[in-house]
Amino acid sequence: MIDMIEKEDSIISEEEAAQYDRQIRLWGLDAQKRLRGSRVLLVGLKGLGAEVAKNLILAGVKGLTLLDHEQVNEESCRAQFLIPVSSQGQNRAQASLERAQYLNPMVEVKADTDRVEDKPDDYFIQFDAVCLTGCSRDLMVRLDQLCSQHNIKVFCGDVFGYHGYMFSDLGREHNYVEEKPKVVKPKTDDSYDNDGPTAKKLKVEVNETTMIKKTASFCSFKDALEVEWTNEKAKNSLKRTPVDYFLLQVLLKFRTDKGRDPYPESFSDDSALLRQIRDDVLEAMGLSSDLLPHDFGRHCFSELAPVCAVVGGVLGQEVVKALSQRDAPHRNFFFFDGMKGSGVVDYFGPN
């Protein structure tokens, strides 16, 4: 889909070249053309959604649609810088539109106030990438399966207190290019040393680079969440597995059961429920509940602006890399722990 758009609309104006000069120097004109020809759907305009929207608009996609049916409340404004303080009671997507468009007038930014669950399948296939934030597990699984059938790239992300994650499914075969230092073979000579002919060593030209074509394969969101942990190979890898993966499973189950995320106002009750869900989820996986400590839930409430900035930066970066087909993508999870101040990339799937 991106390649078709690129052929139809491959000319960048002088104004756009000036606007995106730094980016063109960084990842090249061809990558910027692909980005410029791409349309993205962003679902969810809380703190994380605002960060992703900002990064995609500034990067220079062709169009960005903001889809959110919820209204602005006090919590919405805590980490959401696109919504004016005076917008209480308005639709979140509509309230974010003016400031989002102001970031880059060259990008077509639209607001859609419908429920994502009510959208027909045809609605999603008009986009080159779909980014889902604040969605239920069942919805993310369904839309990932739908989009993969039409070669549409899918991204999921959320922030729960000090913790955040992003997931990407770029399809069974994602092609991209990576810039590497140019390796030059030495000139042939007949020099000898005491041990015979001098060994020819490859020389790396630090000032010259070459583009290497590569391919990466991704699995579905459903397969990534349904890893079999009872076999010996999986058990042996537990020590190297980020506990955030299991934390995500618990938080998504909480969202499914309660239809919301943990509320700070109901901290005591929700903490107890999180512990119960932890026990049930890990038991169903055949794992010990000790993987997550007793007080794991205390840092999973609300959205924190700094965590949204980090996860939103990574998520936006991955969308840009995927659409521009430039540089190696994260495969397939990124987890951020705000308590430790560090993140990790790891792959989860059938293999």
Image (cartoon, rainbow, N blue to C red):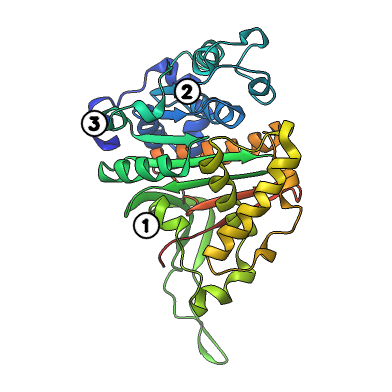
Kind of residue indicated by mark 3: Lys
- Rendering quarter of residue 164: top right
Kind of residue indicated by mark 1: Ser
Q: Quadrant of the C terminus?
A: bottom left
Q: Residues within 10 Å of mark 3 (few under 14, many from 20)?
A: few
Kind of residue indicated by mark 2: Asp
Mark 2 vs mark 3, CA separation in Å: 32 Å
- Position of residue 61 in the picture relative to residue 266 (left or right): left
In x, y percent, where is residue 115? 41, 24
The mark closer to the camera, 1 or 2, is 2
Q: Residues within 10 Å of mark 2 (few under 14, many from 20)?
A: many
Q: Residue at x 32, y 54 (%)?
A: 173
In x, y percent, where is residue 179? 46, 50
Residue closest to the far bottom: 195
Mark 1 vs mark 2, CA separation in Å: 31 Å
Secondary structure under tag 1 reads loop
Determine which residue is flagged by label 3.
Answer: 7
The mark closer to the camera, 3 or 1, is 1
In x, y percent, where is residue 215? 36, 56
Q: Residues within 10 Å of mark 1 (few under 14, many from 20)?
A: few
Secondary structure under tag 2 reads loop
Please say if the residues under marks 1 and 2 sit with CB atoms less than 8 Å apart: no
Vertical relation: 279 (above or below) 201: above
Determine which residue is flagged by label 2.
Answer: 68
Residue closest to the far top: 86
